[in-house]
Image (cartoon, rainbow, N blue to C red):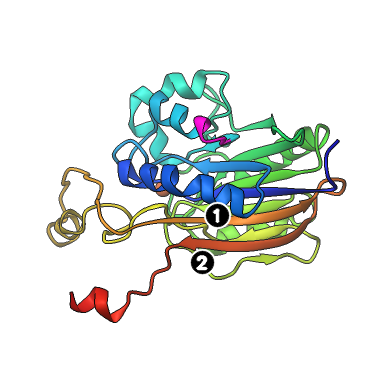
């Protein structure tokens, strides 16, 4: 017998081995602390910043992760493709042109017996010009809502305005719209007027002494020299970012949304001077 509310933890873009280790070290604590029923993780950047291996996915599933979402970087490692093509709950943005491998939405049944719909879409502003995410949502959301009222959307997008507009577009028809991709957690977690939980970006899970997970010196070379330099994930100052949602299982509306960043960004005087 399920409770009337379902407790959902969503972890933002996990970067590199350092990010994955931060998940391994912290996820069981967060799951226990928040009495989590369902865990969703964005894993597009685990494989040295680009893609996700079957072993990475296995590690996440062994931690009780119910669904893995990804994003634009999943296509940059060809070894990710068999994983996308498998029956495992690993998603890529639905609105890539048809013919690409993988799936953009699914339902998962949690250990505690809830059915949760998960949909992943990608924005188009400052991103590849793929199919319309709004029309893709029009297609997928009714299909998911036939199976469950609880639908979580990972909106993988760059532009804040596109994400905010999308939040209002789907307000009341999904449980939450959670932004990913920019790797910087935003302070606009809220319940929209018709009951949809919303945040523009959940934030990165990975090394924070970096430029969005990339080693700082390499990022600076790219910017100063305007040429390609090999991607290498940074290694220090790991943090876990996510949101915790409580959703009414009967109506699918969000009751609460809470940002998580552990540990926080502010350094102590001792850390700076030592
Ligand atoms: Fe990312
Ligand atoms: Fe991305």
| Rendered position, 68 above or below 245 | above
Q: Residue shown at 44%/45% (left/top)?
A: 23
| Quadrant in which the C terminus is drawn | bottom left
- SS at circle 2: loop
What's the mark number on residue 179?
1
Q: Residue shown at 53%/55% (left/top)?
A: 242
Magenta stretch bounds: 61-65
Q: Is 256 within the magenta?
A: no
Q: In the depicted view, which residue is nearer to us: 220 or 234?
A: 234
| Quadrant in which the N terminus is drawn | top right
**Quadrant of residue 94 within the rendered picture:** top right
Report the magenta stretch's main SS. loop
Q: Which residue is mark 2?
A: 186
Q: Residue shown at 50%/40% (left/top)?
A: 130
Crowding near pointer 1: few (<14 within 10 Å), some, many (20+)?
many
**Quadrant of residue 222 within the rendered picture:** bottom left
Residue 140 at least partly seen = yes
Q: In the depicted view, which residue is nearer to us: 221 or 98?
A: 221
Q: Residue shown at 39%/39% (left/top)?
A: 73
Q: CA distance from mark 1 to mark 2?
A: 9 Å
- On the rendered structure, is 151 left or right of 132? right
Crowding near pointer 2: few (<14 within 10 Å), some, many (20+)?
some
- On the rendered structure, is 144 left or right of 53? right
Position in image of residue 145 (x %, y %): 80, 38
- SS at circle 1: strand
| Rendered position, 250 above or below 196 | above
| Rendered position, 266 above or below 108 | below
Position in image of residue 50 (x %, y %): 34, 38
Q: Is mark 1 within 8 Å of ligand 2?
A: no
């Amino acid at each position: 017998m399920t409770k009337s509310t379902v407790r959902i933890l969503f972890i933002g873009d996990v970067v590199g081995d350092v990010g994955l280790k931060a998940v391994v070290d912290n996820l069981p604590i967060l799951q226990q602390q928040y009495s989590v029923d369902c865990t969703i993780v964005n894993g597009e950047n685990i494989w040295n910043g680009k893609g996700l291996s079957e072993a990475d996915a296995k590690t996440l599933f062994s931690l009780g992760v119910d669904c893995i979402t990804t994003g634009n970087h999943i296509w940059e490692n060809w070894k990710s493709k068999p994983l996308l093509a498998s029956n495992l709950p690993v998603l890529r943005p639905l609105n890539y042109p048809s013919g690409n491998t993988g799936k953009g939405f699914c339902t998962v049944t949690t250990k505690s017996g809830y059915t949760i719909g998960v949909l992943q879409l990608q924005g188009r502003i400052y991103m590849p010009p793929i199919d319309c995410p709004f029309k893709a949502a029009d297609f997928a959301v009714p299909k998911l809502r036939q199976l469950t009222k609880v639908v979580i959307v990972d909106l993988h997008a760059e532009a804040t305005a596109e994400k905010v507009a999308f939040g209002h577009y789907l307000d009341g028809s999904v449980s939450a719209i959670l932004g990913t991709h920019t790797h910087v957690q935003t302070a606009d977690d809220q319940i929209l007027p018709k009951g949809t939980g919303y945040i523009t970006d959940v934030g990165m899970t990975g090394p924070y002494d970096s430029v969005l997970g990339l080693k700082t010196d390499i990022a600076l070379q790219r910017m100063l020299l305007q040429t390609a330099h090999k991607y290498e994930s940074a290694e220090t100052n790991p943090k876990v970012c996510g949101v915790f949602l409580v959703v009414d299982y009967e109506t699918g509306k969000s009751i609460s949304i809470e940002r998580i960043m552990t540990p926080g960004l502010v350094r102590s005087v001792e850390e700076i001077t030592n």
